[in-house]
Image: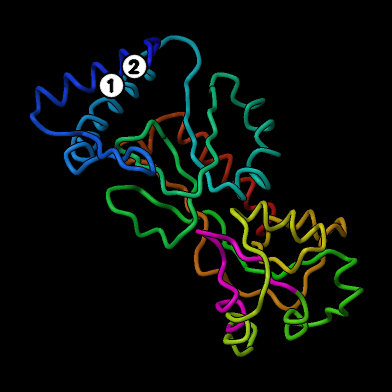
């Protein structure tokens, strides 16, 4: 904003005085938006978002495309391939944000979201672009040491769990034809994000759940070993944008490239 923190505080105080309401609740654990603050952020955010997008479309030079993607999809699939897209579309400037949360397409400055879920999000255009399976993976050393040969053997090892968003061990067990109860009780390690879970598994800290085909390169190289069967994931990857903007040239170009790349690996 190019202003000092104290100036921001004065502006907030002035706005609260004008509205006659507090915009923030200040507690021992930090500052959070009040009910009035959330309502104001929602309504003004849409206006500022529309303004920023209109200016970006009218500006000269490159077209800016802001993409929010599930972290594991961004790091393991999207970023390694983006050079091909940028080389083919030099007039498009990409900004990629890796986030586990569904981007607010109206209030946030995001043009396209590549999200994991069932595609049932209100007020957006969602198209499924990748079908995922859940697989259990471990380091080769752990597989040899504990003799992890099949799905039931997974319980010989600690389980790596992802919080707050991640594949369910009980869901994988049910899909593999096993009793899910022992998987709920099994001890292990909890980490933040599937990327961290894969690193923990590669260091022999336990067995992690991951999505195929996002980690096919790690399995093909031998860095990780699949233990047990593939189980259909309870969510898929979707290409999400605002309905009124789905035909914008930059968004159409990204969608066409993405579908072409995905058709190679998914047949």
Q: Choose between 204 and 125: the one closer to the eye.
A: 204
* Residue occupying image coordinates x 23% and y 22%: 12
- Which contiguous range is marked in magenta? 158-174
Quarter of the image for the N terminus: give it.
Answer: top left
Residue 3 sits in quarter: top left
Q: Is residue 116 above or below residue 64?
A: below
Q: Choose between 25 and 213: the one closer to the eye.
A: 25
The verdict on residue 112 being magenta is no
218 to the left or right of 192 = right
* Residue occupying image coordinates x 46% and y 60%: 117
Q: How many marks?
A: 2
Quarter of the image for the C terminus: give it.
Answer: bottom right
Across and down, in percent, residue 65 comes to 47, 28
54 to the left or right of 240 = left
Disc number placed over residue 55 in the picture, else none:
2
253 to the left or right of 14 = right
Q: Choose between 143 and 217: the one closer to the eye.
A: 143
Across and down, in percent, residue 18 comes to 9, 22
Q: Choose between 2 and 262: the one closer to the eye.
A: 2
Measured Cα–Cα span from mark 1 to mark 2: 6 Å
> Mark 1 sits on what residue?
51
25 to the left or right of 91 = left
The verdict on residue 169 being magenta is yes
* Residue occupying image coordinates x 53% and y 28%: 95
């Amino acid at each position: 904003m190019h202003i000092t923190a104290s100036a921001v505080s004065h502006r907030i105080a002035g706005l609260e005085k004008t509205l006659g309401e507090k915009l923030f609740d200040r507690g021992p654990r930090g500052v959070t938006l009040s009910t009035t603050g959330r309502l104001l952020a929602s309504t003004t955010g849409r206006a500022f978002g529309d303004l920023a997008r209109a200016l970006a479309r009218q500006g000269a030079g490159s077209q800016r495309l802001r993409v929010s993607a599930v972290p594991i999809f961004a790091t393991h699939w999207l970023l390694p391939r983006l050079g091909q897209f940028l080389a083919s579309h030099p007039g498009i400037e990409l900004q990629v944000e890796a986030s586990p949360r569904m981007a607010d397409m109206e209030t946030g400055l995001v043009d396209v979201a590549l999200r994991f879920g069932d595609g049932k999000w209100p007020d957006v255009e969602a198209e499924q672009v990748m079908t995922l399976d859940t697989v259990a993976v471990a380091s080769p050393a752990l597989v040899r040491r504990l003799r992890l040969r099949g799905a039931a053997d997974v319980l010989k090892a600690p389980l790596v769990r992802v919080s707050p968003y991640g594949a369910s061990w009980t869901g994988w067990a049910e899909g593999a034809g096993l009793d899910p109860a022992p998987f709920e009780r099994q001890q292990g390690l909890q980490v933040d994000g599937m990327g961290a879970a894969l690193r923990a598994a590669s260091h022999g800290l336990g067995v992690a759940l991951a999505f195929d085909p996002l980690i096919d390169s790690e399995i093909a190289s031998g860095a990780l070993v699949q233990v047990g069967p593939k189980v259909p994931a309870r969510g898929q990857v979707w290409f999400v944008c605002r309905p009124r903007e789905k035909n914008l040239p930059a968004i159409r170009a990204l969608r066409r490239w993405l579908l072409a790349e995905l058709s190679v690996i998914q047949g």
